[in-house]
Amino acid sequence: MKRAVERKAQVMQWLMILGGVLLAMWVMQAKAMDQNTIAIGVISPKDGSSLVLAGESHEESIRLAFEHLGPLQVGNLQIKLKLIPWNDNGKPEMAAEGAAKLVHEDHAVAILGPVNSGSTKETLQRLRNEQIELPVISAMSTAPELTRSEGRDKNFFRLIFDDADRMGQYATFIKQEKGKAGEQQFLFLYEDNPYGEGLKNSLKDRFYTPNVIALSWLETRRRDCVNPQGNPYAGDFEALRSGQCFTAEFIKLLDDANINNIVLLGEIAGSLALVNGLRLAVSDLKFDYFFVGSGKRLFDEAPVGSLTIGDPVLDYQRASTAELEHNWRKLLGEFEERAKKDRADFMMTAYEAALVLHSALRLTLNGHDELPQPHALRQKLLRVLESEMFDSLEPWRSISFSQGDLNQIPTAPIYRITRGVTREDPLNSHPWIHIAVAPYSPWLEAPVEVQLNAHGVESGKLGVYRVEPLSNHEHLIEDRTVKFSAGKAVERFHLFERGLYHFKMLDVPYYPALSETHVDLSNTYLISACAALVGALLAVSRATATIWTWLIRLPAGVAAGLLLTFCSFYGQQVSGWLPIPSFGSEPVVNAMLTGLLGGLLGPHTMTDLLLAWARRLLPGKSV
């Protein structure tokens, strides 16, 4: 009796030790998820807005910068910078909601964006209302009031000129262009939003002649306009592009006011739609057009001879040295390859915003042995941004801030739109597929999930390649046909061999050129094994057992726990009718509980099952 009590006491002591080890491993696993990782939010519109192209260029330019910069090395700390995108659809309220989510849930230490001034204003207001200190670094928000109002927000830093600076330069150029041509009449057509109104006010205040009529885009069109099928147009831009929806008063104004010049003040998509409509509605009248913005679409579609003032650009033809020209050409070429866009869409200020943030983080963390808490890191980062000087892509221009504004603004390029040849073949859309996969996939926990977004493609063949670790040679191990629904598809691959895998479309253009995941062992199965051992010890110790019983039943319990954990992970991917236990989506918790359950049931259930099989196979033997 005494020996049995001592044995149970020893078992309980071992159980307590194993439980402590298990708990410590769980805590270490939880901390490892976020250790030495800094989250950075990127707010851009990806759909539902005329700013989609700008939003895509904004995010891709930022990602290219961080790809070049790599992890942040400060002393002995190597820090991973994790970009967390948020799609605001170009809507201010969604941008503000995204900023709150990035702070409270993702613990972001800075935000790159938003793209438009309206979203930036709403984001700053939300942070101000919640008394959150967080750097908001915008590469495209040009509204002057963001920094020139009395209550300048200390969270805001602008990497571009404001509307007043750019429109002042534009007004000077237009005066040089038209000032000697005699009396000229100008029509300002501005978009009905803060961006368009800001451009109109800034240009009109600095314009050289009072002969200006200003109308909003909505003031030019009839609200009851329908298409030839009798249905309302899908949107304002489609109505403007048709040329059938202008009001009679507007057409009369164009005829009677002797308008020579039309200045389009708004987003490129709307400006081009308006010009296309004008050329259809009043084809007998000729105007000189002035735009705001740049990019391949504007250069391709705007009337030949038009003028536009663009965003800051890397003009390698104006580079001061051959080395600088080479570096800029290489950078723009990498942007084309990565983003699958024209180099004219590269957003210099977005790339520079990433450079500035990377340098500011390095200065902020200098001398630290471990990462500060997000709140403390944000406060220190704000002070560094306000006080330090940073490099730009232009070696003759440094970046520093005064009250959130750049001390040295980049030049706004002015282009005359020309085309060397006129293409007669029809415009064809270019199909492509975007592939997204997590860079790391834990082994035997779940299938590897590949997300695909198709543009102009209904189906395509997706291949998965295994990369040999020594030779880096790729071997195709599986290919399958993917059919898209609403342009999206998700494919899951069961990759049971550890290593590096690449994913490629075999018959359709795709990007990025390198989509890879590394399948490797995580700590979850070790946690499951420890929990199963604890469960097996509890199960075996409840009855008198010999040393051989312990040696047989303990491994059986551990094996049962590991098997149950594996079935639980993969059971989450199949129909819910299968009686496989699962304890939530957190892998560590699920592994611990399924391992413990398997350890409790396995020593008797699995051993009895093996003995029963042995008796069937060896009927003449006593087992």
Image: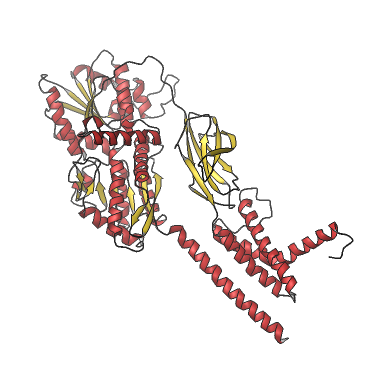
Residue 477 in the image, given as x and y percentages of width and height: 59, 39
Residue 214 in the image, given as x and y percentages of width and height: 21, 29
Residue at position x 25%, y 36% in the image: 323
Residue at position x 38%, y 26% in the image: 238
Residue 3 in the image, given as x and y percentages of width and height: 71, 84
Q: Quadrant of the N terminus?
A: bottom right
Would you identify the image quadrant in which residue 377 lies? bottom left
Residue closest to the far right: 620
Q: Is residue 319 visible?
A: yes
Front-lying residue, 420 or 282: 420
Q: Quadrant of the C terminus?
A: bottom right
Front-lying residue, 522 or 538: 522
Would you identify the image quadrant in which residue 383 lies? bottom left
Would you identify the image quadrant in which residue 528 lies? bottom right
Q: Is residue 534 left or right of residue 4?
A: left
Q: Is residue 549 left or right of residue 415?
A: right
Residue closest to the far top: 284
Residue closest to the far bottom: 2
Residue closest to the far front: 471
Residue 439 in the image, given as x and y percentages of width and height: 48, 47
600 is higher (above) or lower (below) than 308: below
390 is higher (above) or lower (below) than 485: below
Instruction: Count the marks.
Output: 0
Asked which colour scheme the image uses, the reply is secondary structure
Q: Is residue 246 visible?
A: no
Residue at position x 29%, y 59% in the image: 366
555 is higher (above) or lower (below) than 99: below
Front-lying residue, 152 or 188: 152
430 is higher (above) or lower (below) than 52: above
Q: Is residue 205 left or right of residue 602?
A: left
